[in-house]
Image: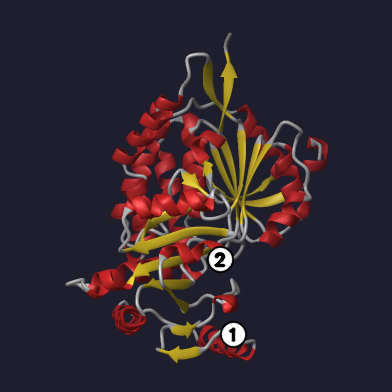
């Protein structure tokens, strides 16, 4: 789509300030604005100030996912990222920004657009972020604090980021894509396929984050030996119930490793502890979500994919007895499948390319490394302790995202 075709397309801008704007003007200002260099002082200071604003804001304090975001953006973490960037420099090549990055985040994970933006802006890119018209409290808080921080920032930062709120208007996505040097699509397989139909400039790069599946593996004997079993339940709750279990890295299935006796005892204790913690956190299950969970569970039983059913209010637990029953279908909202492994290696045939995060408890690093070597890239991009499934990292879905937002300029 040409600039002439862009003319007349009106859109709702949220950042740098709320206004109805013409898309051609927005993209023109973004391109003409001063360029940033990777990990510049202006960017580092802005991100640190934004982090502090989230930490101090009374409304943001009510959302643990916003506090986790602020923690990840704190000055110490930014300095570690800069050290990683410097270590990636090569004598014969210069790391430079891609240019304009177009981020299309999902509507069901309210903070992912900031993580994506952060790595991109640290790399020196200018950014256009599409926000869903489905407004959430978390997104509103982040945009408000972003604009407040922006008001006291250097001019270069004010020209580095635009956030636009619109639906699925193809002509808008087409116009922004035509101006992009890298496009980042977060969402389900369907969203990725639909947006991929919209062309990019021939030189542009694309990162896609489609539907993924995640699970936990717990060694039953180590769990039963814990003095404070509740602590693991609390960590599992954070992994599972934030974003109503709809985040790509939230576990949907728990593999218990150990003897039948140990697994039965560990599972019985664990699910009650998770339920109790969810109730203490006043996690609310909407009637529609609970009905959806019940309907889904009935269908799993009818289709022979679930052998046992237990409704604990805030969560539902489905037991699976045979490996062939295991499925990646899931409804979210606090539903957990469980399956017993005699040893970790039994899990290998189940793994598929779609599998993203394996959270674990009770296993040594050497065992996990050997297991990953055995898979040889067939699936699983992250292996992290229970409680860290939602912790964002520059290494995501098998990509070094920091370097993906950059390009090497060879100097001979």
**Residue 40 sits in quarter:** top left
Q: Position of residue 102 (x, y in %)?
A: 63, 43
Q: Position of residue 103 (x, y in %)?
A: 60, 47
Query: Does residue 153 sit above or below 184 in this rendering?
Result: above
Sequence-wise, the earlier of marks 2 and 1 is: 1
Q: Nearer the viewer, residue 283 or 271?
A: 271
Q: Name the residue under label 1.
A: 296
Q: Quadrant of the C terminus?
A: top right
Q: Which residue is drawn at 36% across and 71% down?
A: 237
Q: How crowded is mark 1: few (under 14 residues within 10 Å), some or many (20 or more)?
A: some
Q: Name the residue under label 2.
A: 350
Q: Residue at x 30, y 53 (%)?
A: 55
Q: Position of residue 48 (x, y in %)?
A: 34, 40
Left or right of 295 in this view: 9: right
Left or right of 61 in this view: 314: right
Report whether residue 159 is seen. Answer: no
Helix, strand or loop under label 1: helix
Q: Nearer the viewer, residue 261 or 77?
A: 261
Q: Quadrant of the N terminus?
A: top right
Report whether residue 153 is seen. Answer: yes
Query: Does residue 326 sit above or below 33 in this rendering?
Result: below
Circles 2 and 1: CB atoms closer than 8 Å: no
Front: mark 2 or 1: 2
Q: Which of 361 and 79 is in front in this view?
A: 361
Picture mark count: 2
Residue farthest to the top, as pictured: 412
Query: Does residue 234 sit above or below 12 in this rendering?
Result: below
Helix, strand or loop under label 2: helix
Q: Residue at x 27, y 72 (%)?
A: 221
Cα–Cα span, label 2 and label 1: 22 Å
Q: Residues within 10 Å of mark 2 (few under 14, many from 20)?
A: few
Q: Position of residue 99 (x, y in %)?
A: 61, 30
């Amino acid at each position: 789509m040409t600039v002439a075709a862009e003319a007349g397309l009106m859109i709702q801008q949220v950042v740098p300030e709320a206004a109805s704007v013409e898309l051609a003007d927005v993209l023109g200002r973004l391109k003409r604005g001063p360029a940033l260099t990777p990990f510049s002082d202006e960017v580092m200071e802005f991100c640190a100030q934004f982090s502090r604003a989230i930490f101090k804001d009374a409304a943001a304090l009510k959302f643990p996912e916003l506090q986790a975001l602020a923690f990840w953006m704190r000055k110490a973490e930014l300095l570690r990222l800069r050290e990683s960037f410097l270590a990636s420099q090569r004598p014969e090549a210069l790391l430079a920004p891609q240019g304009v990055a177009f981020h299309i985040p999902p509507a069901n994970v309210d903070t992912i657009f900031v993580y994506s933006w952060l790595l991109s802006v640290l790399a020196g890119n200018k950014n256009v972020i599409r926000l869903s018209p489905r407004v959430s409290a978390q997104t509103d808080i982040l945009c408000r604090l972003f604009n407040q921080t922006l008001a006291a920032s250097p001019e270069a930062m004010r020209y580095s980021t635009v956030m636009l709120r619109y639906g699925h208007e193809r002509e808008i996505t087409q116009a922004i894509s035509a101006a992009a040097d890298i496009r980042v699509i977060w969402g389900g397989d369907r969203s990725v396929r639909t947006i991929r139909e919209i062309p990019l400039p021939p030189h542009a790069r694309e990162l896609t984050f489609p539907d993924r599946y995640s699970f936990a593996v717990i060694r039953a004997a180590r769990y039963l030996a814990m003095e404070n079993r509740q602590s693991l339940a609390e960590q599992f709750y954070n992994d599972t119930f934030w974003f109503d279990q709809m985040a790509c890295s939230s576990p949907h299935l728990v593999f218990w490793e150990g003897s039948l006796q140990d697994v039965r005892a560990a599972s019985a204790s664990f699910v009650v502890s998770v339920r109790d913690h969810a109730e203490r956190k006043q996690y609310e299950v909407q009637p529609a979500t609970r009905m959806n969970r019940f309907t889904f569970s009935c269908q799993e039983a009818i289709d022979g994919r679930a052998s046992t059913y237990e409704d604990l209010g805030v969560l539902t637990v489905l037991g699976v007895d045979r490996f062939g029953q295991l499925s990646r279908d899931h409804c979210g909202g606090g539903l957990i499948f469980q399956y017993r492994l005699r040893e970790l290696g039994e899990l290998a045939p189940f793994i598929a390319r779609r599998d993203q995060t394996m959270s674990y408890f009770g296993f040594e690093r050497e065992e996990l490394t050997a297991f990953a070597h055995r898979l040889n890239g067939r699936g699983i991009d992250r292996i992290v302790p229970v409680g860290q499934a939602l912790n964002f990292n520059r290494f995501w879905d098998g990509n070094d995202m920091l370097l993906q937002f950059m390009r090497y300029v060879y100097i001979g």
